[in-house]
Image (cartoon, rainbow, N blue to C red):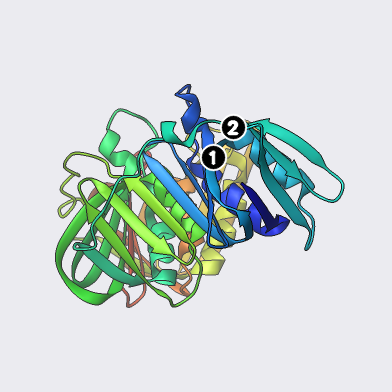
Amino acid sequence: MKIIVNSLDLNDAVSKVSKALSTKDVAPVLECIKITAENDKLTLYATDKDLAIERTIDANVIVGGAFLVPGRIFGDYIRNIAENGSDISLELVDDNRLLVSSANSECNIGILDVDDYPETESVSNEHYFAIQESNLKEIINNVIFAVAVDDSRPMLKGVYFEAREYTLTAVATDGYRFALSKKVLEERVDEISATIPARSLSELSKLLTDSDNILKVFIENNYLLICMQNTKLLTRLLAGQYIKYDNIVPRDFLSTLYVNKETFERALNTASIMSRSERNNLVVLDIEEYNMNISSTSQYGTAKENITISLSGKDVRCAYNSKYINDCLKVITAETIKMEFAQHNSCVITIKDSDEVLYFILPVKQIA
């Protein structure tokens, strides 16, 4: 086997598929990247049996074949020798060694038998939803920050997706906050639902672009498959029933305010500086008809910010984890946001005149 490939293309492909390499103490083959060369294409594939990523690039395939190469070592070496427009040669020598060479570098790496690699899971093309690539990327980023990070409720470590009619809804919660986002689908579907691990979605988001390409997301037999340009991602879904979220968000509110998003975000970041070293990042909101006072206190001192708002209903005095609010503001691109306060000061944040995103945040504590 012998291949000549552009160093930057190879480095990009290796870095992408390496995200699926196992980080646990597992069989040596799962620490490897499978490389297949045929028809002037080089296909790289890595999996930890929960997540798999495949990337195909152009190459000059002089002699085709397939092999397994230790992913971390191979990736580190390629990253260090990759140069603008330079070529890298990959050649099998002595049946169990890979010779990697460029104009100024050369090394040989031990390889494994490709027959020992696990078979790829198959997903049919019967059950899918179709969505614009940029919309899929955006809906992931709109909610993924709200997933749980501990293992006490495994289903909450994923994002629940529900495709129905022409709408895709994504939901995430860690028990203290709740995030929901909606995007339009390109084709009508009856109903498809799945809970996708946050890790897989995070890697998918990095692979997606802001293009208007239409992607099909296939879901079957506890797996999800998505095919992008020259790249495929396959992930195992989380097994079990996601929580019933329909009644989580309150419907009756005591107070409603509108505020400029950038002004609020800047003031919140400034006022919360004092509490960032504290466990709950506590900020206090004092809200009256036309003003919101934001403050935080710690052993280092007190910080306060005052901004103009428009409030209808009762005055509000409440305390929240500033990170929970700030995570929402980071992904909202609208000029004006709407904040609604229910009994016990739970807060719902939406975009003015839009149902594309909704964030529900519980207060840290009651304030008299």
Callout 2: 10 Å neighbours few (<14), some, many (20+)? some
Q: Secondary structure at mark 2?
A: loop
Give left or right: position of 284 versus 119. right
- Could you tell me residue 231's position as x and y percent? 47, 59
Q: Earlier in the sequence, mark 1 or mark 2?
A: 1
Which residue position is annotated with label 1? 67
Which residue position is annotated with label 2? 111
Residue at image point 24% right, 62% down: 125
Answer with the quarter of the image where residue 78 lies. top right
Residue at image point 35% right, 44% down: 120
Callout 1: 10 Å neighbours few (<14), some, many (20+)? many
Q: Amino acid at mark 1?
A: Phe
- Could you tell me residue 245's position as x and y percent? 19, 51
307 lies above or below 62? below
Residue at image point 36% right, 39% down: 50
Residue at image point 19% right, 63% down: 126
Q: Nearer the viewer, residue 263 or 217?
A: 217
Tell me the quadrant of the picture where the C terminus can be found.
top left
Q: Secondary structure at mark 1?
A: strand
Report the Cα–Cα distance between label 1 and label 2.
Answer: 7 Å
341 lies above or below 210? above
Q: Is residue 355 visible?
A: no
262 lies above or below 202? below
Q: Nearer the viewer, residue 81 or 304?
A: 81
Disc number placed over residue 208 in the picture, else none:
none
Q: Is residue 159 visible?
A: yes
Asked if the residues shown at circle 1 and circle 2 are in contact, with their CB atoms under 8 angstroms apart, the answer is: yes
Query: In the orientation shown, which residue stands out farthest toward the left?
Result: 190
